[in-house]
Amino acid sequence: MRRHRSCTAPLDKAAQVRELEEFFRGQNPIDLAAADWHTRMEQGLTAEEEAEFTEWLAASTAHEAALRHLGQSLAAARSIPPEQVARLRAEQARRRSQSAPHARPEPAPQRPSSEERQGWSWSRLLPRPALAALCCTVALAVGWHQWQQQPTFTSSHLTPRGQARTITLPDGTALSLDADTQAQVTLYRDRREVRITQGQILFAVAPDSARPFHVLAGPARVTVGGTRFSVRYRATGMEAGSAKVAVQEGHVRVAGAQGAATPTDLVAGQALSVSPAGVLGPVSAVAPGSIALWRKGLIRFENTPLADALVELERYGPTGLVVHDPAVAALRIGGTYQASRPAEFARMLAQILSVTLVARPDGQTEIAAAP
């Protein structure tokens, strides 16, 4: 590992300690311990320190995770072009000045005690010659992490009932939103995210290996690089609470948002559903041409209760159809229908189910049990 030399140790020891204390005060003790060990390992550990490090590492899985995360952050930070490093430091300086514009210099503190905090002590860290290097290392890693977490683009989208639209994101990804769909888009420097609150979207994701694309939809989390797939999620109505993913091109990885199951990879022509509890259903075959039928003005039901089917049809416009009999509402139907032709749908119901159509004085048509 090469060492950072972009920070110079202050000549005033008291000011050095004061600056370091101010920065460390808001940091996680485990992260600080990881930074300390990282710096010590760069300078070489004695046999005694090797044993101490092994003991610290074995004390908790959080220690290893913190050290690994720090290493990844540093590797990414050290690859930042110099002009971005300068901009990052300028942003940090500006935030500090805005948060405490009239702050007075604090008197030099007394030497900190050796009180242990989750395996890390001030007395072990502060006297070390590598103090300035550690300060720079942690500051750059933390600053880089915070910089990565700042969105570069955000937008919210809502398609009303009976309307659909296609939007193109700054990265070239195209989102085709079905009627009555709501979604939030957030692009970061290291990833892209779309959260579906309700409805369904057909994605054509622009490839970007450095920024994976995530779709969060109820209990499901879908991760892709670049592909074409659809995701449906609704809290009410047909398949309420579950999420359905179907792939047209490429491949995606589907996981339960709560980590309830091992992720499953899907390729073109495959689909699966994620239950409200986050359990992944079996992988099923699906014709790529049948994915996102709503783009063709079609709607497909598979063993769907009639009441849910009517709710689904209402997403595309008023149907004028009502059901009052619970037994009729529970009847199940299947098949593909024109979403914009509810009257034709009702006539077909009378042919495939034991129901009759009754004209009501208010102009609506009731689907009732056949006499």
Image (tube, rainbow, N blue to C red):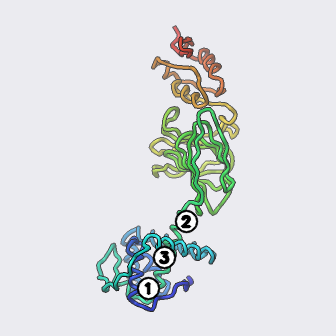
Q: CA distance from mark 2 to mark 1?
A: 26 Å
Looking at the image, residue 138 sits to the left or right of residue 30; the answer is right
Of 92 and 343, nearer the camera is 92
Residue at image mark 1:
131
How far across and how far down the image is residue 346, in percent?
60, 18
Q: Secondary structure at mark 3?
A: helix
Q: CA distance from mark 3 to mark 2?
A: 14 Å
Badge 2 or badge 1: first in the primary sequence: 1
Residue 118 falls in image quadrant: bottom left
The residue type indicated by label 2 comes to Gln
Position of 312 relative to 281 (above/below): above
Q: Which mark is residue 148?
A: 2
User: Going 29% across and 78% down the picture, which residue do you hit?
Assistant: 115
How far across and how far down the image is residue 27, in percent?
40, 72
- The reply to whether discs 2 and 1 touch (Cβ–Cβ < 8 Å) is no
Q: Residues within 10 Å of mark 3 (few under 14, many from 20)?
A: some
